[in-house]
Amino acid sequence: MLDRRAFLAVCSRFGVSATLLPGVLWAMADENGTITRDMIDKAADIADVPIADEYKNMMLESLNDLKKGYEAIYALHIKNEVAPSFIFDPVLPGMKFDTQRRPIRLSAAPAVHASGTPKNLEEVAFYSARQLGELVRTKKVSSSALTEMYITRLKRYDPLLKFVITLTEDRAKAQAKEADREIAAGKYRGPLHGLPWGAKDLLAVKGYPTTWGAGGFQKQEIDEDAMVVKRLDAAGAVLVAKLTLGALALGDKWFGGMTRNPWNPKQGSSGSSAGSASATVAGCVAFAIGSETLGSISSPSTRCGATGLRPTFGRVPRTGAMALSWTMDKLGPLCRAVEDCAVVLSAIYGPDGKDRTVKNVAFNWEGGSDWRKLRVGYLDKDFSSQPPQQQQQPKQEKNLTEAEKKKHAEDAAQQAAFRAMREYDHKYDQAALEKLRTMGVELVPLELPKLPYRNMVIMLEAEAAAAFDELTRTGRDKLLTSQGKDDWPNSFRTSRFIPAVEYIQASRARMLAMEQVAKVFEQVDVIVAPTNSTQLVVTNLTGHPAVIVPNGFRGEDAPKPRVDENGDLQPGGPGTPVSLTFLGNLYGEAKMLSLAKAYQDATDFHLKHPALAAGQES
């Protein structure tokens, strides 16, 4: 069908874009998008717009030629895996990076089970990947036993938390058996050898469905392994499950239900790396891989209490992963400790010859590096200011229907609840700064440039609409689970009306953001920030890395979360985790993780784990 945006552009050329005519004419177009001269006449009459006869003929030719051109592109049935010809590069002129890759240097080996092989293997279910790796390396625990234990836990807690889409049990058992054989023969591949992990189900795994969490894609199989899967295979890790994501990487609702927060299963886990966060925090995998376009690692890490790493854009190849936004998608690990993230990143980063965004920049992790030498900034205003008061809209109750009045009351109550939670959480941010100061960190107050970052997000929306254009045009978007105003089906439809010029303008504004944020990072190596602040949008647009760590748990005096109409709890409430974010310079993950590890070592939030009741239906 004729693209409405192009249609409006043609109308604009004839000076009628600001009138009623385009809308009226569009409504008259037949089901194939064909425009006739008679339609132009009728639309012009209704809109009271005089159009000369010679213009009508030219308009007909232009509009219907456009239709033929679009159909030629549609006929290609371009797959999601095909990227546009342009490449987003967050690196600015003059920036230089280390390209010499050196062997990973871990911190001192962690203490593991003192009495040798645990009698009950589930005692180690919540161990960090580093601790589990030591158990396997020292042959206190076999990969096969560890794999069986985690598969059992996945099956036990999935009815409660709904974090599994597909168990890869046969593949996992074969990999674990091979890992045990190699380790027994002295062929040890490194700290991930024999460790069971889970993949967000937007990563292709040959021989298994890759569902993207979306209705209509439940049986989709992609005949390859994603590059990240191949690299973890090479590291000796054992893939035990393909984990949930919100449909097409939005939220925590997928075709099988809603993934849950292990700390309070009446709440969603947030998303879209929903299963990756939930399963990791529930002690059902050693670590997981997720993805972030705009908060999809950060948000579930915060909600569930995981330690999540969003690497620099262009650090990890996305080959074999579902594309949502070619200029913003990033793959990264969700773990139980910071150094786990460093170990996983060491295994998966670097060029693969296919993802053209990935640069040859070294990530050299040194677990014992001196973080005290780092220059550290913090977002002063984001930490010191309370959440802004919601502006009250003038009430016009007499002109509203009962349904509208109810909706307004619900919105007001939700805003009040959100503000109460933000005000309560403010003390955790303050405590984090105080803890860093007692560690000897000299914090430099900083502020991010003031730019219309939210308006630049139309780039993501337009790219997502393009990535799933055929889904929209064929009407198959009706198969997706969620169909509300903020869900993908509506977003994909409305994003078709973003003018190409405005997409380019947003890209130009994004360049200004990259240049100005780069100047802020010239002053420091790491920035400490509240997780739920403007930085989340800013750094996803500029491509900067972030690590999100648990930063405490809400007390019994925390505001009680509201209950949705469907019975689910809103975020927050007693016993649920809060988080803190460390931001790094482009390709500066090593320094960023070094400070985050020091902070995590000085606290014990990441060592706590939820008490789960097996077999419950949420």
Image (spheres, rainbow, N blue to C red):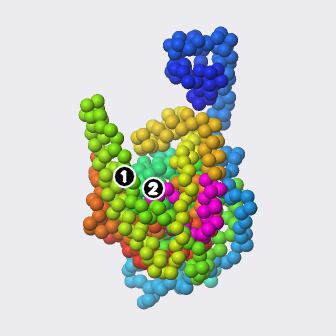
Which one is in front, 487 or 238?
487
Q: Is residue 300 left or right of residue 76?
A: left
Q: Residues within 10 Å of mark 1 (few under 14, many from 20)?
A: few
Tell me: residue 87, above or below residue 528.
above
| Horizontal and vertical percent position of residue 158 | 38, 61
| SS state under label 1 | loop
**What amino acid does circle 1 point to?**
Gln
- Is residue 254 visible from the viewing direction of this image? yes
What residue did someone put label 1 on?
A: 389
Query: Horizontal and vertical percent for residue 438?
Result: 46, 80
Instruction: Give the residue at the far bottom of this rendering.
Output: 115
Disc 2 secondary structure class: loop
Q: Is residue 81 left or right of residue 154?
A: right
Residue occupying image coordinates x 73% and y 72%: 100
Q: Which residue sits at x=47%, y=58%? A: 533
Q: Which residues are magenta?
A: 513-535
Residue 152 appears in the figure: no
* Mark number, residue 130: none
Residue 429: give x, y in percent of width and height. 42, 67
Q: Is residue 518 magenta?
A: yes
> Which residue bears the numbered disc 2?
271
Q: Amino acid at mark 2?
A: Gly
Mark before the other along the chain sequence, 1 or 2:
2
Residue at 56% across, 24% down: 18
- Judge by depth and name the residue closer to the eye, 527 or 69: 527
Residue 16 image-quadrant placement: top right
Position of the N terminus by quadrant: top right
Alpha carbons under labels 1 and 2: distance apart:
27 Å
Residue in the picture at 60% in, 35% down: 499
Q: Please say if the residues under marks 1 and 2 sit with CB atoms less than 8 Å apart.
A: no
Q: Is residue 226 above or below residue 326?
A: below
